[in-house]
Amino acid sequence: MNLTFREALPEDAAKAAELIYSAGPETIAYAFATSRHRPIDFIRTTFANGSGVIGYKNHRVALVDGRIAGIGAFYNADRFDRLSREMVWQVFRFYGIFKSWGVLKRAGRLVTIMPPPPQNALFIQNVAVDAGVRGRGVCTALFEERIGAARSEGTRLCVLDVAADNTRARKLYEKLGFQAAEKRNWPYSDGSGVVPDHVRMVLPLQGDEKT
């Protein structure tokens, strides 16, 4: 298996959207599905645009034999607020003025289980590996590459959120040195959708840092 890495590009949008959606379909559908819009179409459009949390500029892809087999968003947490504001405008452009308010309301609720990261952290999101190569070290290698770069740059810790019931991913992150910091339960039961509880996990990079 020939495994390489590179920064994501706009032309990766179709495969990237498929992988990103697979990383958390229930959570993504809750926030971005409407009667007229598929969330994967929003992801594809936003990824290709480049800005915002889902934009290609924040993502790195893993290639197996030249084909995209894994993806992850890795960015400094200091950029989180700006990227979130950019995504608000992307929502308005994609959904239109009337549908956008419901999307933004639901997306805002996700902060209760996935709050903003602490400063000077490498924030990791949208991690997914193609089903055909899972268990072959693709995600581990992608993480090790990005974590190594973050450590050399003086970043104090890495932070990610994972669904509490995603035991496979949690075990992988634990093997990489991440520790569960806090579990946050989904507090809404108004019939608008079910989102898994989430666990925040952290990996100290400089000494014994904690969130």
Image (cartoon, helix red, strand yellow):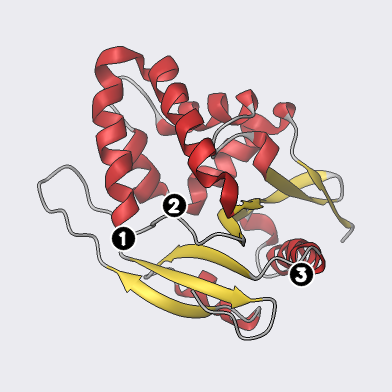
Above/below status of 80 relative to 179: above
Discs 1, 2 touching: Cβ within 8 Å: yes
Location of residue 139 in the rendering, given as x and y in whole percent from the top left corner: 69, 64
Write down the residue under mark 3: 151
Decide which of 24, 94 is in the foreground and name it.
Answer: 94
Mark-to-mark CA distance, 3 and 2:
27 Å
Is the residue 211 above or below the residue 207 in the image?
above
Q: Quadrant of residue 54?
A: top right
Disc 3 on helix, strand or loop?
A: helix
Q: Which residue is mark 2?
A: 24
Q: Earlier in the sequence, mark 1 or mark 2?
A: 2
State the residue lying farthest toward the left.
190
Q: Is residue 48 left or right of residue 167?
A: right
Q: Residue 48, can we see it? A: yes
The picture places residue 98, in percent across and down from the top left corner, at 25, 15
Where residue 203 sits: x, y (%)?
Answer: 60, 75
Mark 2, Cα crowd under 10 Å, few <14 / some 14-19 / many 20+, is some
Give the x, y percent position of residue 173: 58, 74
Is 25 displayed left or right of 205 in the figure?
A: left
Q: Residues within 10 Å of mark 3 (few under 14, many from 20)?
A: some
The amino acid on which the numbered mark 2 sits, given as a three-letter code, is: Gly
- The amino acid type, in three-letter code, at marker 3 is Arg
- The quadrant of the image that shows the N terminus is bottom right
Residue at mark 1? 196
**Residue located farthest toward the bottom when viewing the structure as drawn:** 208
Real-space CA distance between mark 1 and mark 2, rounded to the nearest whole angstrom: 9 Å
For residue 67, side relative to residue 187 (left or right): right
55 on left or right of 87? right
Q: Secondary structure at mark 1?
A: loop
Pick whichever, 85 or 39, lies toward us: 85
Helix, strand or loop status at disc 2: loop
